Image: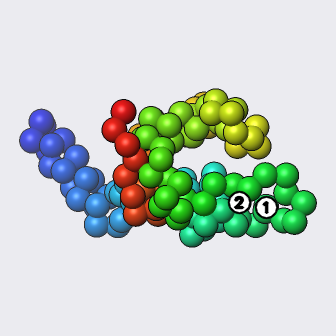
Amino acid sequence: MKTTMKTILAAGVMLTASFGFAAPSAAENVDKVYQFYCTQCHGADGAGKGINVTEDFPVTPRAFTNAVEMSKLTDADIVNVIKEGGPITGKSAMMPPWSKTISEEDTKALLAKLRELCKCQGPAG
């Protein structure tokens, strides 16, 4: 009986994988998270010109593609803004805190994505 149950479980795992029900890769997930939470202001390309940014938009969203500015930020600075919002660094309250919405894993993945967009690293610390 135990062998039959193991066989059934193994078959179920193989079927799940063969039908594409596996968990999304980290890259797929971070792209979805970025698109949902960030593109409205920062833009799909990270240039700071999302669909919400109009002439009367009261702030200029950070351009993640600006390597000069992004390289001034430590990884901890970026994570703090993602988690706590703009006011944590004296920036606009229009950048909301996402600590209760975006998981720790997705926050780390977003950090990597932002570093990819700027093609830069920040200072140590």
Left or right of residue 93, residue 110 in this image: left
User: The disc labelled 2 sits on which kind of residue?
Assistant: Gln
Left or right of residue 17, residue 53 in this image: right
Quadrant where the image shows the N terminus: top left
Q: How many marks?
A: 2
Residue at image mark 1: 52
Question: For the point 44% across and 35% down, which residue is it?
Answer: 76
Give the x, y percent position of residue 26: 37, 54
Q: Considering depth in this image, is 83 or 7 the residue closer to the camera? A: 83
Give the x, y percent position of residue 29: 45, 55
User: The disc labelled 1 sits on which kind of residue?
Assistant: Asn
Q: Residue 16 carries which label?
A: none
Question: For the point 28% across and 66% down, which residue is it?
Answer: 18
Residue at image mark 2: 40
- Between disc 2 and disc 1, whose residue precedes? 2
In 3D space, how far apart are the residues under numbered discs 2 and 1 (Cα atoms)?
5 Å
Cβ atoms at labels 2 and 1 below 8 Å apart: yes
